[in-house]
Amino acid sequence: MEVRNDREGMPMERYWAMTAEKVVEKLKTDCEKGLSDEEAIRRLTEYGENSLEEEKIKSPLRMVIEQFKDYLVIILIIASVISFFLKEAIDGILILAIVILNALIGTLQEYKAEKSITALKKLSQPFTKVIREGKLKEVNVTDIVVGDVVVIGSGDVIPADGRLIEAKNLRIDEAPLTGESVPAEKTEKELEDKEIPLGDRKNMVYMGTNVVYGRGKFIITATGMNTEIGKIASLIRSEKEVKTPLQIRLEELGKILGTAILLLCAVMFVIGSLLQNRPLFDMFLTSVSLAVAAIPEGLPAIITITLALGIQKMVKRNAIIRRLSSVETLGSTSVICSDKTGTLTENKMAVVKMYVDEREIDINEEKEIEKSEKFLIESAALCTDVAIDTTGQMIGDPTEIALVVALNRVTGLKKEELEKRFPRVEEIPFESERKMMSTIHSIEGKTFRVITKGAPDYVIKMCGYVLKKNRIIPLDKNEVETILRVNEKMGQQGLRILGVAYKELTKLPEKLVSEEVENDLIFIGLVALMDPPRKEVREAVEVCKRAGIKPVMITGDHKITASVIAREIGILEEGNKILSGEELEKISDEKLTEIVKEISVFARVSPQHKLRIVKAWQKNNAVVAVTGDGVNDAPALKQADIGIAMGITGTEVAKEASDMILKGDNFATIVAAVEEGRTIFANIKKAIHYLLSCNFGEIFALFVATILGMSLPLKPVHILWANLVTDSLPALAFGFEPSQEDIMKKPPRPKDESIFSGGLIYRIPFEGAVIGIVTLIAFIVGLEKGINVGRTMAFAVMNLSELVQALNVKSEKIGIRDKFSNKHMVIAFLIGVIFVLALVMTPLNEIFDFSPISYYQWNVVILLSLIPLLTGEIMRLRKNFR
């Protein structure tokens, strides 16, 4: 027997392949008496509590400090300090204010306590029943230990991993761990396969799963971080958060700008002091002015606010974003790895087909119901243990709930109405050995009817007759072969099939012995169920494909079930492959990276497999989004470029590990989110284009003026005003730009694509040079009336031409109409114009050392300010006629 130690504590073994007696011997316990109190205390002391280690959460102070690590922010802080040193207090205060504002916005939006491990603890209940010293006791779940014998029943949450030693009609919902929508049937018998996947270990139970039906006893084999959930918790802790494409691009932009600014200042200082023999202090002031012009002070805050606006838009589309940068990441997504259950499907079983009277019937077809069909669904619904709670909600096994729902849908009857007509008087519960259950109902108080439902091959063995065209005839070999052939065909379609049979009794048997009651039954037909795909998913998948995004299904379900759903919604197409977790185990990481693009469906996978799949795609330079709702999805959600959790069915663990939560658990919302993400990035790119071209214009004007030996056309405070007030309003307005019509018909942006792609690397300096030139011309014209008039005209032209540049950047269409289609841009433009007029024409001009300018000079200012727009239109015309 191979033993492995995953963590400190009890060794982990393949307990599912052992007999119950061997497990008892291995763990030194007793099935009947359990552990002694003394031994339990000893083991608790030695191996620790049955709890999950908590990850240290960032303090708010640390979050604030991290906001100041950005390269560009550091340069801004240095510029602020220098401004105070030079007694330019207004400049220093303005720069510092914008830095602090940006830090506050970033901290508030990205305040995300890392509660992944804490959330896992919510999956367990505070107390559980264990047998110690031969007595049944209630013990706090943190105090149970390996070797404890735990008693479980319907409604209980499993408190630790364990090997079953008793299972009576036991079914456990393992969806949070395995992703399977159907509760797993459990047994106490050992399994032969030592390498069996977690979802097929029918004699094992796992922490955090729920008992749906039946009762049992198990011996604890692992507690705390040694449980399967504990291993997942370890994976969550070990996976570092991946930087988003936007974060990477902005870091690069900050470094490029910062380095360029420092070099430019150094060059200016050398030229002025050494070549032009200007005073060192004057050149230092000039260099600082140039640095102020070069730094886009408002850029970090503009991007943060634009993303925050995007988050508000996403909320309206039922998507909650937990991190600012995640909005843009959606727009870069090239692969969506989606869980099946609850994400692509409805996460509830539903009857889809029936087989009766040698006919396969689609339950969704609109047609008049026949007598035989009605009898089949009524019998199936009566043979269930579904109960109705005080709120009217159905409680019970999902498969049985589906039968009751189908009864109402097909016949219009409710189960309670049917039970009044045919009250249950006896029952033989479901047992895994028989694969059936039977109920006995009174017929008008005179006779009785036995109804049996279960696995078709087991039910049919107990039948001697078949109901056909409302006649009871002997069940011959040909009939049996036909029924089993239909059963196999439906099974290959990924359906869960139940056989239903009945017989009439004149009196109740004295003893309810299954062999006596469940014999010579009359076969009625088959009922086929499945967890159906969401109606809107197929269209959402098609939109993804048109947008160049590859949808991939990752599920804990079997290959057949997964492939049927994947084909129905369009994920699995001709030429695509499906891979199981067992096959995945035999493939190296290098091989998986090589073949992952060919695979559209991964079935029967574990959390470790999901991580490998995500990493394989990331090695192929893909931006990966992962959707999920279970505990098993959490590691992959955290590793992915963007993790998307389900809001309704999602566990707390999945939500805390995610970047985005879908309020309606609707896969189609992801498509809307991707569109929004692409739009937001396009708008951020416009804002960067706009701000950098304006800043380049300011640099150009100062640089050329210095080289030519002229006085500076603008003072640092003038440039700061333009950067923080005039430029910021249009830049913010870009955040309200609507989506382009063809935005979801373009492929995703490459992960390594520069933020200056699409010709921006040339357009920004060209457009900036135009702004710089018209600013210098205005300065030269105004110099005739004095330095203050020159600077007033230069300031007015610079601000107005930058407002006009916003219209240039907004739209690539020729003509004025589209330039003013965004009302927020119109408002920003008008406010900017008002600010310029107020600073030039009111007593405020004294603060900035401005002088009133004449009517003629205003005409010059207006004409020069329109030149950037005219230049842009000419460039667009030229591009269109190529």
Image (cartoon, rainbow, N blue to C red):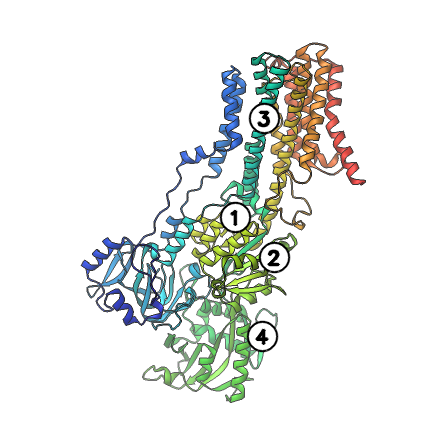
Mark 2 or mark 3: which comes first in sequence?
3
Q: Which residue is mark 2?
A: 541
Mark positioned earlier in the residue sequence (4 or 2): 4
Binning the other alpha carbons within 10 Å of mark 3 as few (below 14), some (14 to 19) or many (20 upward) gives few
> Which is closer to the viewer, label 2 or label 3?
3
In this rendering, the answer to whether 388 lies above or below 807 is below
Disc 4 versus disc 1: distance between alpha carbons? Answer: 42 Å
Cα distance, mark 4 to mark 3?
Answer: 77 Å
Query: What's the CA distance linking mark 2 and mark 3?
Result: 50 Å
Q: Residue at 57% of width from left, 26% of height from top?
A: 262
Residue 130 lies left or right of residue 673; in this view the side is: left
Q: Nearer the viewer, mark 4 or mark 1?
A: 1
Whether label 1 touches label 2, CB < 8 Å: no
- Badge nearest the viewer, 1 or 3: 3
Q: Which numbered disc flags the more N-terminal residue, 1 or 3? A: 3
Residue 146 drawn at (x, y percent): 28, 60
Residues at badges 4 and 1 in contact (C-beta under 8 Å)? no
Q: Residue furthest front?
A: 274
For image coordinates 63% across by 38% down, the residue present is 685
| Residue that badge 1 annotates | 642
Label 2 crowd (10 A; few <14 / some 14-19 / many >=20) = many
In whole angstroms, how far apart are the C-alphas of marks 4 and 2?
Answer: 28 Å
Q: Position of residue 281 (x, y in %)?
A: 56, 13
In whole angstroms, how far apart are the C-alphas of marks 1 and 2?
A: 18 Å
Determine whether the residue tagged by mark 1 lies in a helix, strand or loop: strand
Q: Which residue is mark 3?
A: 263
Question: Who is closer to the viewer here, 74 or 716?
Answer: 74
Tag 3: amino acid: Leu
Image quarter in which the N terminus is found:
bottom left
